[in-house]
Image (tube, rainbow, N blue to C red):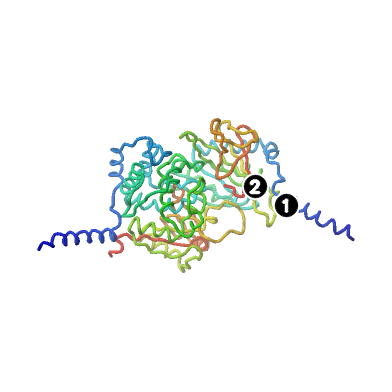
Amino acid sequence: MRNKQAHIPLLIVIALYACSCKTLNISRYYHHHQSTLDSIEQMYTVANKEKPFSIEFTDRRFDRVSLELATDSLTYIYEFWVGEDRMQDTLRKYGFSTRTVNNLITNMRSVDCTWINNLDYYTDERKHSLTYVTLWPRAFNFPFVKKKYYILTYFQQPQYFDGEGNLLVGRRLRRIRKINAEAFRRINDKVCYTLSDRFR
Amino acid sequence: MKSTPPLLLLIIFLSTLSLRSIGGPGHSTREETLTYLQSTHLSDTSIYWPNARGHLFLENLRENVRSPLSMYQGSNTNFCGYAAFSYLPLHDDPLQYVRFMLALYTEGHATWNNIKFSPSPEVMLAAGTLRFKGILDIHPADQMWFLVLADHFRSYLNLFHRKFYTGSEDTFWAACNLGKFNRMITRLMGYKTRTVGSDLIRPGIKDVYTYLENAIQTGTTFLYVNNTYLHVKNHDKSRFSFPTHYIVLTDIQRIGDIFQIIYWDYGGRTLRQVTPEFMKKIIFGVVCCIKEEAHEK
């Protein structure tokens, strides 16, 4: 009887560990899905240069998609069901490529990517851009557990890191660079990640 | 007889004071402000603002005057109240704004509508050093403007964050509650405001659409909103229920059962369609500015 009760705390610990959000190895996840993730980034970067936009999945099933379409005067935010005719009409109306956006949506769904956007940052008064790709792997979906996201940042140039793999401001300024108040770690020279409770 | 001139002077002085308090700002145009800026030269360094570079400062002012909608509060800062407030001087009296900023830069203090701004040394050191905030990184004038306003106007939200430390722009040091926001408008711009709402309880407007439509027709309309719904950052079902953000509502239209709104925040205007329930849920305050012409009617 005593032996049986002794198992209960152990089971609780195992259950808590299973619910922990740190079980996913993002580096492994990235390498496993590298071709898809890199192609998403490539496709997005090219399309975004032409006409800026961002894509967000608003639900856990990746069925609802919110598009932010930037034009010269206004940014339009619309939410659609994936594949909805209304979405195609809207994209055409504002001059966005339906093919590219649909491809992006399909690829994003396949790797549980919930958000993609472009971010500008500045070093020595010079503007640089990076692509912000947020992953919300389905393994993270536990009730009562705060939502966690893995954010990948794709830089255009190789970055500087300290010995522990933390992203630095630059070669001379060896401060930790924060993007959206988050510190990032190295996956490779141009791709970094962080774990965050916000997807943007 | 001898006492007449001083009495006359006193009357003129008093009438000037009363006109000032009623009349609010002088109105200036974008063109005259840009002309004024063209003839302005600054050294690249200031003894008061050691980290604000003169050439970036001037370029930032020009950019704000040329396209006032592009003013950006910076990512993850608590400067939204000050950024939203800027909508008024940049549209209604850009020359006053530019003169104020130049006086701050060159003299280390400045006066606006009889209110003297003497920024703290911490703020003077910080302006120009804020980083990883998007384009705010290279906008020292905006950094200075937000920091100076936050440093001068204080409220109960700032009670436990009295002094500026590195990173305070993201904390309650910079927070702006509805009372403070109103105070900035009335004291600096001299406008009367019609305000409903509070920092914790929603205003309970019965017909949101009609109310907001009337407000927009009356004057510049600010909404104090719960940003966790407007600018969603995570997929959590439970979200806290208090306001955190200011936007400028510029248009509202009813399309069937939904509202189509156009608002300004984060350096640009956004159009989106929302349900009436959503509007009611996010709005904690509505501030409508009534300019002189409107309240003379």
Position of the C terminus of chain B, as image quadrant, is: bottom left
Res A157 → quadrant: top right
Q: Which residue is mark 1?
A: A19
Q: Amino acid at mark 1?
A: Cys
Q: Nearer the viewer, residue B262 or B14?
A: B14
User: Nearer the N terminus, badge 1 or badge 2?
Assistant: 1
Q: Is residue B2 left or right of residue A157?
A: left
Rendered position, A25 above or below B175: above
Identify the image quadrant of residue B106: top left
- Classed neighbour count for the residue bearing mark 1: other residues with Cα under 10 Å, few (<14), some (14–19), many (≥20): some
Left/right placement of residue B288 relative to residue A194 reads left
**Residue type, label 2:** Trp
Give me the residue at 70% from left, 41% from top.
Answer: A25
A134, above or below A171, in the image:
below
| Helix, strand or loop status at disc 2 | loop
* Foreground tag (1 vs 2): 1
Q: Residue furthest left?
A: B1
Q: Chain of mark 1?
A: A
Q: CA distance from mark 1 to mark 2?
A: 15 Å
Q: Which of the labelled discs sits on residue A7, or is there none?
A: none
Q: Secondary structure at mark 1?
A: helix
Q: Which residue is mark 2?
A: A136
Q: Position of residue B231 (x, y in %)?
A: 53, 52
Residue B72 in picture, x, y percent from top left: 44, 46
Q: Quadrant of the N terminus of chain B?
A: bottom left
Q: Is residue A99 visible?
A: no
Where in the figure is residue B256, as x and y percent of width and height?
Answer: 48, 61
